[in-house]
Amino acid sequence: MAEPILEVKNVKKYFPIRKGLFLKHVNDVKAVDGVSFELKRGQTLGLVGESGCGKSTLGRTIIRLYEATEGSIRFKGRDFASIGGADLRKERQNIQMIFQDPFASLDPRMTVAQILEEPFKVQGIGGDKKERAARVRELLRLVGLKASYLNRYPHEFSGGQRQRISIARAMALNPELVVADEPVSALDVSIQAQVLNLMKDLQDKLSLTYLFISHDLAVVEHMCDVIAVMYLGKIVEIAPREELFANPMHPYTQALMSAIPKVGTGKKRMSRTLDGEVPSPINPPSGCAFHPRCPKKFDKCDKATPVLATPRDAMAEHQSACWLHELK
């Protein structure tokens, strides 16, 4: 078995709400509320859930664009959450991020050559100017773009080409872990498959590990080895891909599965509809956060918070946080 490259334990990210003349702390937005998982080297772990469930905040907290409110983040066995200064800058070579909107994440005032050379300048590596230029050309070739594009600006490219440039920038420092935050959701459907296949090819060539964030279960099924389902800041179910799609255990996962478009039906089949809206992360419901929308809730659901555990009729790697499993 491959060793864990990333270990996340009880990570929380709260954003304080302040009011009044003296900005008194009155409450918190509990964007991520006690998430734990392990990601093994060479795997792709998918984080999936509705908008606002905390997926992107968790990804940004893991790479320390946000600082965790609580919890432990270990990268290659080292406490990544507590290092700083030169140590953090050096370790960041090994953890990169691909953002959702390639137009917003690329500086419109810089050419492609400048964008791809920037990581080497920040880290102070890559040799002299000639060696860096050669590396930049190699990066473009790696993502299927021509060297003649080097002196163009981001606005001169299509969305798919811009995302390829973003991927090239993420690959510049030979990272081991890449956090991909909705990397194809801003692209046309006809381009999405090309970018996803590029990411899979790069994973094989460069021995990458991905944390893949998406709201689209069909995309996650194509990309991921293990899938974690998030709801209101918590993981409610996690399992290997085949097991999750064959045997979804949590009512929320079952509802998400039923909303996947079925080929030939012409529309989404909603065998389990979700009533209501996602509750506010400022004042989440008591007990199981999903219980106000759950069609299977019973009297225990609003009184105690279930924890991830393996249901009796599931494989050992399959965990779900639901009180229904106790009734079976």
Image (spheres, rainbow, N blue to C red):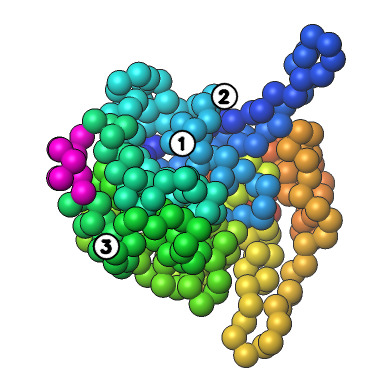
Q: Is mark 3 on a helix, strand or loop?
A: helix
Name the one closer to the observer, 313 or 213. Answer: 213
Q: Give the residue drawn at x 65%, y 47%.
A: 53
Residue positioned most to the bottom:
264
Verify whether residue 128 appears in magenta: yes
- Of mark 2 and mark 3, the one earlier in the sequence is 2
**With 245 as the anchor, is 177 left or right in this view?**
left
The residue under label 1 is which amino acid type?
Ile
Q: Give the residue drawn at x 39%, y 50%.
A: 111
Q: How far apart are marks 1 and 3 (CA)?
A: 34 Å
Q: Distance between the residues labelled 2 and 3?
A: 44 Å
Relative to residue 248, is residue 293 depicted above or below? above
Relative to residue 211, is residue 11 depicted above or below? above
Residue 3 in sight in this render:
no
Quadrant for the C terminus, please.
Answer: bottom right
Q: Mark 1 points at which residue?
A: 62
Q: Mark 2 points at which residue?
A: 69
Q: Mark 3 points at which residue?
A: 147
- Give the magenta-colored segment's residue range: 125-133
Please identify, in this view, whether the residue under mark 1 or under mark 3 is nearer the observer: 3
